[in-house]
């Protein structure tokens, strides 16, 4: 970063409340000024492309697919982090909450015990100046897991945590309250159905008691450390009432219209998956993100398992939902997630904000990320 003024000119700039053709002046990693029409001096000519704020991603477990690309395969942690970081930046994301799972599965499988290896690799990459994006941490705490509380406590004592979500994927609960739906979902792993049913029976027998003990302990931990708290897969108004009592700011992927409406009534921000919106519905049979948008109940989009879906969903939303303009849609993937997690310095193109900017070429339903800057420095 330098104090030299850089000007981005000849762009369709997505401002908080409008799209204007004009220019943006940047210095010291911050936005100095924006203006309409011809820039006061020549700068970087964006040739009429769209300029949007850098995207803010709150829930992506995509790092895990780089670290564990095949069953029982573990990639080099630093190599996985760098590949993931490059993909995130190329998707227009400049701030990412790396979603690391805390809590092992009952059969001892999964990545719930390997979050420290990944966090150490992220810390190493940050210390060596290798990262393109600003990486924060989102701990996805599987509350029925026997080891989730000590694991989360140890992690929070060693690494900064920006967000904690309380997840319960026990068959018969929340997202999988229809156990048959769970069996169909679990069958995608390729495991024999007999094994899936046996594990589900064990999880149902142990899950409720574990969750009842662990949930309040994790809520207390988040309060002690001042960590933003999110609920996960709220299904009923009772689920939302519990989340509100615990101080949740954010509801990740409510599964029903009832739950999303209850979140709005309680002042809890609603986040849905961008892949859900692009595909036209949930892959696990829950409420469609577009349906919530039509009801005015959608506040934030998350790329979840496809990083490029974040911008693509925001791009498509104005075409699919009446009343959504491009500024409102871009806010779902920039300003709104930033504010929901206490980040006041980014998420919109306005004086004083961090110069996180993305140049986008319009190409029908699929926007093309041409260039990305974080704090005024080119990263993709």
Image (spheres, rainbow, N blue to C red):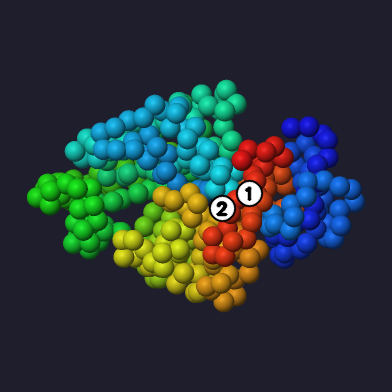
Query: Spatial distance from mark 1 to mark 2, Cα to Cα?
Result: 23 Å
Percent across and percent down for residue 25 are 81, 47
Note whether 241 is above or below 222 in the view shown.
below
Displayed quadrant of residue 184:
bottom left
Picture quarter with the N terminus? top right
On the picture, is 224 further left or further right than 30? left
Which element is circle 2 on? helix
Crowd around label 1: few <14 · some 14–19 · many ≥20 (10 Å) = some
Residue at the (42%, 43%) spot, across then down: 62
Crowd around label 2: few <14 · some 14–19 · many ≥20 (10 Å) = many
Task: Specify the label residue 337 is tagged with.
Answer: 2
Percent across and percent down for residue 89 are 56, 42
Task: Specify the label residue 370 is tagged with.
Answer: 1
Q: Are marks 1 and 2 in contact (CB under 8 Å)?
A: no
Note whether 236 is above or below 6 in the view shown.
below
On the picture, is 110 further left or further right than 326? left
Q: Earlier in the sequence, mark 1 or mark 2?
A: 2
Residue at the (39%, 66%) spot, across then down: 281
Residue extending furthest toward the left:
194
Res. 259 in view: no
Is residue 61 or residue 130 the one in the foreground? 130
């Amino acid at each position: 970063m330098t104090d030299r003024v850089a000007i981005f000119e000849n762009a369709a700039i997505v401002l908080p409340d409008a799209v204007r053709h004009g220019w943006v002046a940047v210095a010291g990693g911050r936005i100095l000024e924006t203006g309409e029409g011809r820039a006061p001096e020549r700068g970087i000519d964006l040739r009429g492309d769209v300029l949007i704020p850098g995207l803010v991603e709150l829930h992506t477990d995509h790092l895990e697919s780089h670290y564990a690309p095949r069953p029982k395969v573990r990639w080099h942690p630093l190599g996985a982090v760098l590949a993931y970081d490059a993909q995130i930046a190329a998707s227009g994301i400049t701030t990412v909450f790396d979603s690391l799972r805390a809590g092992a599965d009952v059969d001892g499988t999964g990545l719930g015990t390997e979050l420290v290896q990944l966090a150490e690799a992220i810390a190493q990459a940050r210390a060596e100046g290798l990262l393109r994006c600003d990486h924060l941490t989102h701990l996805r705490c599987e509350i029925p897991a026997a080891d989730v509380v000590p694991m989360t406590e140890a992690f929070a004592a060693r690494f900064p945590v920006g967000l904690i979500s309380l997840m319960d994927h026990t068959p018969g609960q929340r997202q999988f309250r229809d156990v048959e739906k769970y069996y169909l979902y679990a069958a995608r792993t390729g495991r024999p159905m007999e094994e899936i049913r046996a594990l589900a029976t064990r999880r149902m027998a142990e899950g409720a008691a574990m969750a009842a003990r662990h949930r309040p302990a994790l809520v207390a931990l988040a309060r002690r450390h001042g960590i933003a708290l999110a609920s996960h897969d709220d299904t009923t108004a009772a689920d939302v009432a519990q989340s509100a009592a615990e101080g949740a700011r954010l509801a990740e992927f409510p599964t029903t219209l009832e739950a999303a409406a209850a979140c709005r009534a309680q002042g809890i921000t609603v986040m849905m998956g961008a892949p859900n919106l692009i595909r036209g519905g949930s892959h696990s049979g829950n409420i469609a993100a577009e349906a919530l948008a039509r009801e005015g109940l959608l506040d934030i989009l998350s790329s979840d398992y496809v990083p490029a879906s974040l911008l693509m969903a925001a791009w498509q939303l104005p075409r699919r939902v009446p009343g959504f303009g491009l500024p409102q849609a871009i806010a779902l993937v920039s300003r709104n997630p930033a504010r929901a997690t206490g980040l006041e310095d980014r998420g919109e193109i306005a004086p004083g904000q961090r110069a996180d900017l993305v140049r986008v070429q319009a190409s029908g339903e699929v926007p093309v990320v041409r260039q990305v800057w974080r704090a005024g420095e080119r990263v993709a």
